[in-house]
Amino acid sequence: MFLNWLAKHLAAYLSKQVARHSVPTSTYEALEKALQPGDVLLVEGDTRISVAIKYLTQSTWSHAALYLGPEAGLGTSENGQPHTLIEADLEFGIRPLPLSFYRNSHTRICRPVGLGDDNIHMLADYAQSRLGNQYDLKNVFDLARYLISTPPVPARHRHKLLSLGSGDPTRTICSTFIAEGFQRLRYPILPTIDTMPSDDPNCADCISEHYRIRQTSLFTPRDFDASPYFRIIKPTLENDFDFRAINWADL
């Protein structure tokens, strides 16, 4: 009972806003228009845990949500807006929410290439089956160590901190939930690639590549941005951008 109480209050503390929202790089209307079901929406968060994740991963992005669209049947918010996203939240677990929740946030759209309607349906079914799931208690306590603002670790090794602790401390990070969904489809994010000699008898120096699924607990939000298999969609450019129309102050 005491541990549950402590974990709840610790999660609330880590989820507390400590900075202002960063400046969005597109209008909300352009973002809403550009999104498609199956997209991963990366967010530059502003909470205590967001600051730590951005530092440890050396990335702008601290949070990720899966966009399924208004036709996904995720219900509506208190003000009647359709839930279009599913995310894994530290304090509330896996939940649906409207896109407007991130209206004032700096975001990036990462789009998986080549998914068919059946793949999108499988991804949506997986995500909806996880609604309401909560985090393991041990993982909430693990996140407390992320409050160290400047751990004495070289920059090239900071990413590895995310796999220490209880064995799967990053299960509390949103990207784990989304990565598992894509890997169930056998869709690559940042797979491990093994190389070995080719079986071609006419080419002694040839090699073959074999892809291996990575452990989902090792994924972070920046991996979707870095993945060569996700297209980066910039809403401003998707809407007939014309640099000549910019109203420069000095002109």
Image (spheres, rainbow, N blue to C red):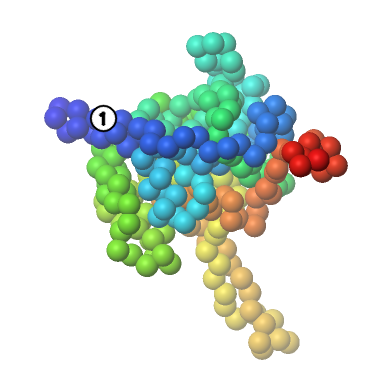
Front one among 209 and 67: 67
Amino acid carrying label 1: it is: Lys
Residue 65 visible to an observer of this rendering: no
Q: Which residue is mark 1?
A: 8
At numbered mark 1, what does the secondary structure look like: helix, strand or loop? helix
Quarter of the figure with residue 156: bottom left
Q: Residues within 10 Å of mark 1 (few under 14, many from 20)?
A: some
In the image, farthest residue toward the front: 250
Q: Position of residue 204 (x, y in %)?
A: 66, 88
Q: Position of residue 56 (x, y in %)?
A: 40, 55
Front one among 237 and 94: 237
Instruction: Please give the name of the residue rendered at 66% of the width and 87% of the height, measured from the top-left corner.
Output: 205
Q: Quick one: quadrant of the C terminus? A: top right
- On screen, residue 107 versus residue 149, left or right, reads right
Front one among 61 and 160: 61
Q: Quick one: quadrant of the N terminus? A: top left
Instruction: Please give the name of the residue rendered at 57% of the width and 63% of the height, measured from the top-left corner.
Output: 211
| Location of residue 179 with respect to 78 vertically, above or below | below
